[in-house]
């Protein structure tokens, strides 16, 4: 008799738990939280949720404990939040994950408020076996299975994206907006050159400026097409000037020569927190400037850079490396590679490889400086309260440091 009563109570408990988990509005679902609190413990230890996020719907696959994933469910964003909150009432710990994307981290912060441990993961192809079938349901199921392995201790199950604070995210958005406006300006300028080429004319340089605009000799139809583009570019230039001034105003006065306030701010806002890295290999990997590698047994092949990390950081570091060559001849990586850069037989591709190497090493050195592991002077970096603002390009004239190195090379070869 007692055994039968225990079986009946267990069956009722499972029914109530399932009602709460499914979001049912029945009276039994309303009694489940009270039953759970009365017993002093929740029915499950862990629930895991794989979420495929879209604008108007979320596809979710749930896994209870280490069991088989349940069939996918579809929710609107508001419905999902209500349902996710109810999961915390039936499990001691709720885990979830979704891919980083255009929706930012608002969902992550809301789930965190509910007490859910959420992971924002790097987007990837979840079709591990190459079945050539990709659906929201399959992605959500693959995510929850990877989440189960990650929670159990397999940190290689997926790549977790670091979630910045709201202040860091807003600061980064401002610098990225400037980058977007710059690209839009370049696109409009190229569109104007395309209009001119179509009618047999050729535009060079900043054709929209007052000086060059008066000297343009093109058919009247080209002028008619260029005029609205010119107004848009001038408006963009004004916005870019305002954004650049606000960014540079936040930079410190004392910086290494050649780094520049704008470069400093973009780099700082993209990294957000230098203390996030524990060792130099992590810094180099984040830049994506490490070589690709294909090694097996006695064979080892290293190719071009992987471009695995943050592309904006990589662009900024390459620009900074060219300026360091010009203004920081005593900086150790520059002093090492300067004779090779100055050699007349050094090819253009080799120069690019050297600049990438300098930029990668500078990222590691700057991490050491920002985390107070060393001082900039110890690395050979000279500071200047008013660093130059114009970055040299690979096609620019030879810098004074390169010219001096070439002179030394010629003298040594004569001797």
Image (cartoon, rainbow, N blue to C red):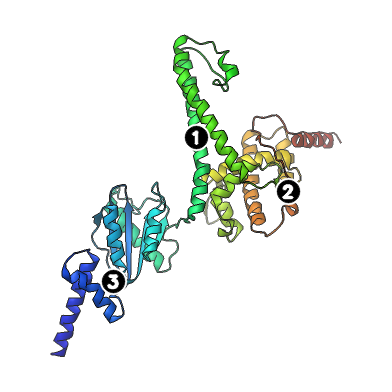
> What number is the disc on residue 181?
1
Name the residue located 25 percent from the left edge and 57 percent from the top edge: 72
Q: Quadrant of the N terminus?
A: bottom left
Residue 405 drawn at (x, y percent) = 78, 37
Kind of element beneath mark 2: loop
- Label for residue 381? 2
Callout 1: SS: helix
**CA distance for labels 2 and 1:** 32 Å
Question: How far across and how far down the image is residue 112, in percent?
Answer: 40, 62
Alpha carbons under labels 3 and 1: distance apart: 48 Å
Q: Quadrant of residue 283?
A: bottom right
Q: Does the image show residue 290?
A: no
What residue appears at the point 58 percent right and 42 percent down from the top-left corner? 247
How crowded is the residue under tag 2: few (<14 C-alpha within 10 Å), some, or many (20+)? many
Q: Secondary structure at mark 3?
A: loop
Residue lying at the far bottom of the rendered structure: 1
Going from the N terminus, do you reach mark 2 or mark 1 first? 1
Q: How many marks?
A: 3
Residue 340 drawn at (x, y percent): 71, 39
Q: CA distance from mark 3 to mark 2?
A: 58 Å
Residue 345 visible in the shown view: yes
Residue where numbered disc 3 is placed: 90
Q: Earlier in the sequence, mark 3 or mark 2?
A: 3
Q: Is residue 77 above or below residue 25?
A: above
Circles 3 and 1 in contact, beta carbons < 8 Å? no
Residue shown at the point (23%, 68%) measured from the top left: 20
């Amino acid at each position: 008799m007692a055994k039968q009563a225990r079986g009946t109570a267990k069956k009722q408990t499972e029914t109530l738990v399932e009602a709460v988990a499914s979001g049912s509005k029945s009276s039994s679902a309303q009694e489940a939280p009270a039953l759970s609190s009365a017993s002093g413990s929740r029915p499950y230890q862990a629930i895991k949720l794989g979420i495929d996020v879209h604008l108007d719907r979320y596809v979710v696959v749930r896994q209870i404990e280490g069991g088989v994933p349940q069939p996918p469910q579809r929710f609107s964003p508001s419905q999902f939040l209500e349902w996710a909150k109810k999961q915390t009432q039936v499990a001691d710990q709720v885990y979830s994950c979704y891919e980083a994307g255009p929706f930012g981290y608002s969902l992550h912060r809301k789930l965190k408020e509910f007490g859910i441990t959420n992971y924002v993961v790097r987007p990837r192809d979840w079709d591990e076996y190459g079945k050539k079938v990709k659906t929201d349901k399959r992605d959500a199921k693959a995510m929850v299975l990877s989440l189960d392995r990650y929670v159990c201790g397999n940190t290689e199950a997926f790549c977790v994206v670091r979630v910045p604070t709201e202040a860091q995210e807003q600061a980064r958005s401002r610098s990225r907006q400037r980058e977007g406006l710059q690209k839009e300006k370049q696109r409009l300028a190229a569109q104007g050159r395309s209009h001119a080429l179509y009618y047999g004319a050729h535009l060079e340089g900043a054709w929209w400026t007052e000086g060059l605009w008066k000297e343009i000799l093109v058919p009247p139809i080209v002028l008619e097409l260029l005029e609205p583009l010119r107004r848009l570019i001038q408006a963009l230039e004004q916005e870019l000037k305002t954004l650049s001034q606000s960014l540079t105003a936040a930079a410190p006065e004392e910086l290494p020569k050649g780094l520049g306030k704008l470069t400093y701010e973009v780099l700082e806002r993209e990294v957000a927190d230098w203390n996030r890295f524990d060792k130099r290999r992590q810094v180099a990997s984040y830049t994506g400037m490490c070589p690709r590698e294909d090694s097996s047994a006695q064979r080892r092949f290293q190719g071009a850079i992987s471009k695995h990390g943050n592309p904006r950081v990589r662009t900024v570091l390459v620009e900074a490396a060219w300026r360091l060559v010009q203004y920081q001849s005593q900086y150790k990586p520059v002093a090492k590679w300067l004779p090779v850069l100055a050699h007349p037989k050094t090819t253009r591709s080799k120069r690019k490889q050297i600049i990438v190497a300098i930029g990668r090493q500078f990222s590691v050195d700057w991490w050491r400086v920002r985390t107070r592991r060393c001082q900039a002077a110890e690395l050979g970096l000279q500071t200047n309260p008013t660093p130059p603002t114009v970055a040299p390009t690979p096609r620019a004239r030879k810098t004074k440091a390169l010219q001096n190195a070439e002179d030394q090379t010629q003298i040594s070869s004569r001797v």
